[in-house]
Image (cartoon, grey):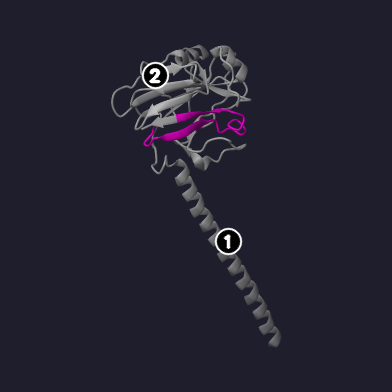
Amino acid sequence: MEGSHGLLRLIFMKNRTIAVLLVIVGLGSLLGSIAYQAYSARSIGYLGQQPQYLPSQQPYPSGNGGMMGQRTSSSGESVTIQEAIEEMRNVPSYASVDSSDNTVVFDSQQVSIFVLALMPDRAANLTGRQMPNYATGDVFVIYGLINPTLLVPRGAYVQFTVVNLDDDMYHNLVVSSYGPPFGYMPMQGMMSGGWMPYLPPADYNSGSPQQYSYMLQFNQPGIFWYICTYPSHAASGMYGRVIVTG
C-alpha cells in the first residue's frame, strides 16, 4: 500500500511539473504574441495611423490619376520588356524629375509610380547614370533615376506598379517605416501596403517579364522607405526614400 502511495505521489509530482511547464510556455507564447503585435502595429502604422491599402484592381477613389489602363491582378500578368521600359520613361504630368538631386516630386493626390527592378549594369546602361554609392547589387529604376527619393503630398493615394526586368533574381517592392541599415532578411512585420509577392526573373527570350500593382494612402508626413524584401537585397542597397510632405 505504501508503495502505491509513493507511486501516486511520483505521478502527481511529474504531472504538476508538466502543468507548470505548460503554463510557462503558454504565458511566454502569449507575451510573445502581444509584443509582436505591438511591434507590428508600431512599425506599419505610419506614425500611428494604419495606411489604407487598396487591392491592385481597385481604381482611385475619384478621377483616373494618370492610371495606365487596367491594373494587374495579385498574381501579376505578362507585359513586354519594351512596354515596361517605355512606361518607366513616361513621366506623369504631375511629376518633376530632378536628376541632379536624384529626386522625383509628385504634385497630386492621385499618384502612379512605375518601377523597374534591375541588375546594376542594366540599370546604369538604361539610365546613363551611376549607381548610388550605397548600392552594391540590384536596384530600382523610376522615371530614369536609380533608387530616387520620392516626394509625395500628405494624404496622396500612391499606386506602385513594379516590373521585374532582372534576368536571374526575384524581386518585390514594399514600404517600410524603418530605414537602413537593413538586415539580411527584413522582418515582414515592419512592412506596409499589404503583401507583395516576389516577382520571378524576366524571360528575355520571350520578352515577357512580370508586373504587380498595389495602392497605398500616405496619411501622415514623414520619411519612409521602399525596399526589396528578398534576402540580402535591401541590405545591399535595393532601397530608396519616400518623403511625405505635410
Q: Are marks 2 and 1 in contact (CB under 8 Å)?
A: no
In this rendering, which labeled residue sits more in front, label 2 or label 1? 2
> In this image, 42 relative to 130: left or right?
left
| Residue 202 percent across, percent down from the top left | 57, 20
| Residue 232 percent across, percent down from the top left | 62, 33
Measure the C-alpha gap from mark 2 to mark 1: 54 Å
> Can you name the residue that lies furthest to the right here?
3
Start-end of magenta stretch: 217-242
The C terminus: image quadrant: top left
Is 228 inside the magenta-drawn segment?
A: yes
Q: What is the three-letter code of the residue carrying label 1? A: Val
> Can you name the residue that lies furthest to the left here?
62
Which residue does the image show at 53% across and 36% down from the upper left?
179
Name the residue tied to disc 2: 95
> In this image, 153 relative to 5: left or right?
left
Q: Is residue 204 visible?
A: no
Q: What is the three-letter code of the residue carrying label 2? A: Ala
The N terminus: image quadrant: bottom right
**In-front residue for pair 25/158:** 158
**In-front residue for pair 76/226:** 226
Which residue does the image show at 60% across and 38% down from the upper left?
183
Callout 2: SS: strand
**In-front residue for pair 50/104:** 104
Which residue does the image show at 42% across and 26% down from the upper left?
151
| Residue 134 percent across, percent down from the top left | 60, 27
Callout 1: SS: helix
Is 238 inside the magenta-drawn segment?
A: yes
Query: Residue 25 shows which numbered tag?
Result: 1
* Crowd tier of the residue under label 2, counting other residues whose Cα lies within 10 Å: few below 14, some 14–19, many 20 or above: some
Q: Is residue 198 visible?
A: yes
Q: Is residue 1 above or below residue 191?
A: below
| Residue 98 percent across, percent down from the top left | 45, 17
